[in-house]
Image (cartoon, rainbow, N blue to C red):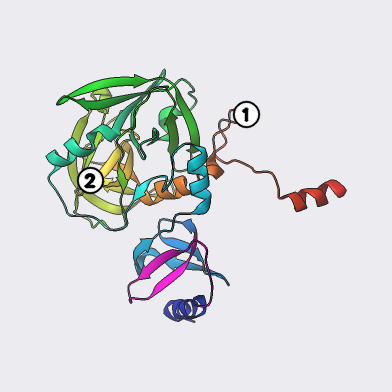
């Protein structure tokens, strides 16, 4: 059975399947699949359509509409995020704007992350102080502070927050989720996560970060390639200047949406920067409970949950 026949069969049989919270995957031939997205990879999605799980190549997908997952809503409520999504995301780019106006609009959402061992960048994904940075920025550190630049009376004021909690880590994809827990912290401005899949080679992109400690530095370039393979992982390659201190900061498209997380460059060349595709960031956030940080085992990127009660009873009975 060909892929198109498989999809057509899935769409037909899926009509009789009821999902409490279904995601919708729009395909190039105007067909659509409804089901639960089990996993998101750089080249494909794995979708539960009720009777089987489908592997759908990203090349066949034109759009994704995600339902608000009940588990994420519960986690968000428990974390004090409130109703709605844990982060804002879109799968289609908005209208391009000039970088100057975008920086004024979203610049406050980009922060500097400091540890005794160095510094990096990061960005807020919601107003309650949750932010993304690179794992290597906070690796081996527990004393973390975040410097935020707030617009007040037409000027930028620097605020330093020192009660920063590590929520989740994924050292395989070099990502970390942090939260500011300082009492009296305001609601923070956050970014929208876009789609690296929607980008084309040659599209304009820009980064905001703290290269070499020079906070709020803006650099602009183009997307050089979407599929640069390094050490078994696919990265976005960009001509945007990336330097130490940019790590963990956002790479934006010209609509002001995050399309990647800058994390490295080739030191003996110019204009050879790399970023983690935002699709991996979304997957990390959607499954953050599986990557929850534990002080009992701080270097472990996975959290091992207790077995279901019935399984546990059988084990104990033996």
Q: Quadrant of residue 44?
A: bottom left
Figure disc tally = 2
Which callout, 2 or 1, points at the residue further toward the start of the chain? Answer: 2
**Residue located at (40% from left, 66% from top):** 25
Label drawn at residue 256: 2
Q: Secondary structure at mark 2?
A: loop
Residue 289 spot, x, y in % from top left: 54, 43
Q: Quadrant of residue 164?
A: top left
Q: Is residue 71 above or below residue 134?
A: below
Q: Is residue 232 left or right of residue 271?
A: right
Q: Is residue 46 left or right of residue 219?
A: right
* Magenta residue check for 65: no
Q: CA distance from mark 2 to mark 1?
A: 39 Å
Q: Quadrant of residue 150?
A: top left
In the picture of the structure, the residue carrying the numbered disc 1 is: 296
| Mark 2 closeness class: few <14, some 14–19, many ≥20 residues within 10 Å | many
Q: Nearer the viewer, residue 70 or 98?
A: 70
Q: Is residue 97 visible?
A: yes
Q: Is residue 127 above or below residue 156?
A: below
Residue 210 spot, x, y in % from top left: 26, 28
Label drawn at residue 31: none
**Residue located at (22% from left, 56% from top):** 201
The boundaries of the magenta stretch are: 16-37
């Amino acid at each position: 059975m060909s892929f198109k026949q498989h999809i057509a069969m899935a769409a037909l049989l899926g009509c009789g399947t009821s999902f409490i919270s279904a995601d919708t995957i729009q395909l190039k031939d105007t067909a659509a699949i409804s089901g639960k997205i089990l996993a998101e990879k750089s080249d494909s999605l794995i979708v539960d359509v009720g009777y089987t799980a489908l592997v759908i190549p990203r090349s066949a997908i034109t759009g994704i509409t995600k339902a608000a997952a009940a588990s994420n809503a519960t986690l968000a409520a428990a974390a004090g995020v409130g109703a709605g999504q844990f982060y804002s995301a879109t799968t289609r780019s908005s209208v391009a704007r000039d970088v100057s106006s975008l920086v004024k609009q979203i610049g406050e959402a980009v922060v500097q992350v400091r540890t005794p061992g160095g510094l990096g960048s990061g960005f807020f994904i919601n107003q309650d102080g949750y932010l993304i940075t690179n794992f290597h920025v906070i690796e081996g550190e527990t004393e973390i502070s975040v410097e935020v630049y707030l617009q007040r009376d037409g000027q930028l004021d620097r605020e330093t927050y020192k009660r920063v909690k590590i929520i989740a880590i994924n050292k395989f994809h070099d990502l970390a989720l942090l939260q500011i827990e300082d009492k009296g912290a305001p609601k923070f401005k956050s970014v929208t996560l876009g789609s690296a899949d929607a980008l084309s080679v040659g599209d304009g992109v820009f980064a905001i970060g703290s290269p070499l400690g020079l906070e709020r530095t803006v650099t602009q370039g183009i997307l050089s390639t979407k599929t640069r393979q390094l050490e078994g992982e696919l990265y976005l390659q960009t001509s945007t200047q990336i330097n130490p201190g940019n790590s963990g900061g956002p790479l934006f498209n010209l609509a002001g949406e995050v399309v990647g997380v800058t994390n490295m460059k080739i030191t003996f060349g110019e204009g050879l920067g790399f970023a983690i595709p935002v699709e991996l960031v979304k997957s990390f956030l959607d499954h953050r409970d599986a990557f929850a940080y534990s002080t009992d085992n701080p270097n472990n990127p996975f959290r091992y949950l207790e077995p279901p009660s019935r399984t546990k009873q059988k084990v104990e009975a033996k």
